[in-house]
Image (tube, grey):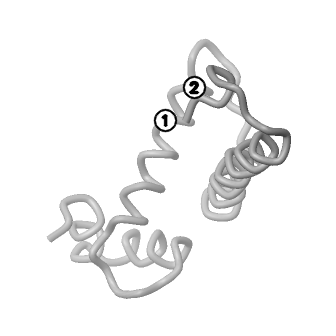
Amino acid sequence: MKILSRYLAGARFAQAACGHWGVENNLHWQLDVTFGEDKSRPRENHVDANFSILLRTALRLLKNGQTAKYGIKNKRLMAGWNGDDLRKVLFGK
């Protein structure tokens, strides 16, 4: 939602800003808990941007995966241990 292309009352603007940062903070928290993103420090060339895209893609696949009702971190572990779970995460089957 574009919030600066039109006039918004202060309360509505604050609500929109908080909503945006809530989503952003939740995403960052999930990436850090699931993949330890804050501990990872790739800095050469475009490695950091590419790695970030891969982590977000993996997170989206895990969230949308048709595996059992585990948390994201456990789904990641199960996909690493079991080929059937990995196929379910990657292909949704």
What residue occupies the far left of the structure in this picture? Answer: 93
3D distance between C-alphas at marks 2 and 1: 6 Å
Q: Is residue 87 left or right of residue 81?
A: left
Q: Which mark is residue 62?
A: none
> From the viewer's perspective, is residue 12 above or below residue 73?
above
Residues tagged 2 and 1 counted as in contact (Cβ below 8 A): yes
Q: Which mark is residue 53?
A: 1
Q: Nearer the viewer, residue 9 or 48?
A: 9
> From the viewer's perspective, is residue 52 above or below residue 23?
above
Q: SS for tag 2?
A: helix
* Quarter occupied by the N terminus: top right
Residue shown at 70% from the left, 22% from the top: 43
- Expressed as whole percent of the image width and height from the top left, the position of residue 87 reads 21, 67
* Quarter occupied by the C terminus: bottom left
Residue shown at 56% from the left, 72% from the top: 73
Q: Nearer the viewer, residue 8 or 25?
A: 8
Q: Is residue 45 left or right of residue 36?
A: left
What residue occupies the far bottom of the structure in this picture? Answer: 69
Q: Nearer the viewer, residue 80 or 60?
A: 60
Q: Is residue 30 left or right of residue 90?
A: right
> From the viewer's perspective, is residue 83 above or below residue 60?
below
The amino acid sitting under disc 2 is Ala
What residue did someone put label 2 on? 49
The amino acid sitting under disc 1 is Ile
Q: Could you tell me how many numbered marks the image carries?
A: 2
What residue occupies the far right of the structure in this picture? Answer: 10
Q: Residues within 10 Å of mark 2 (few under 14, many from 20)?
A: few
Q: SS for tag 1?
A: helix
Q: Residues within 10 Å of mark 1 (few under 14, many from 20)?
A: few
- Expressed as whole percent of the image width and height from the top left, the position of residue 81 reads 38, 76
Q: Quadrant of residue 79?
A: bottom left
- Expressed as whole percent of the image width and height from the top left, the position of residue 53 reads 49, 35
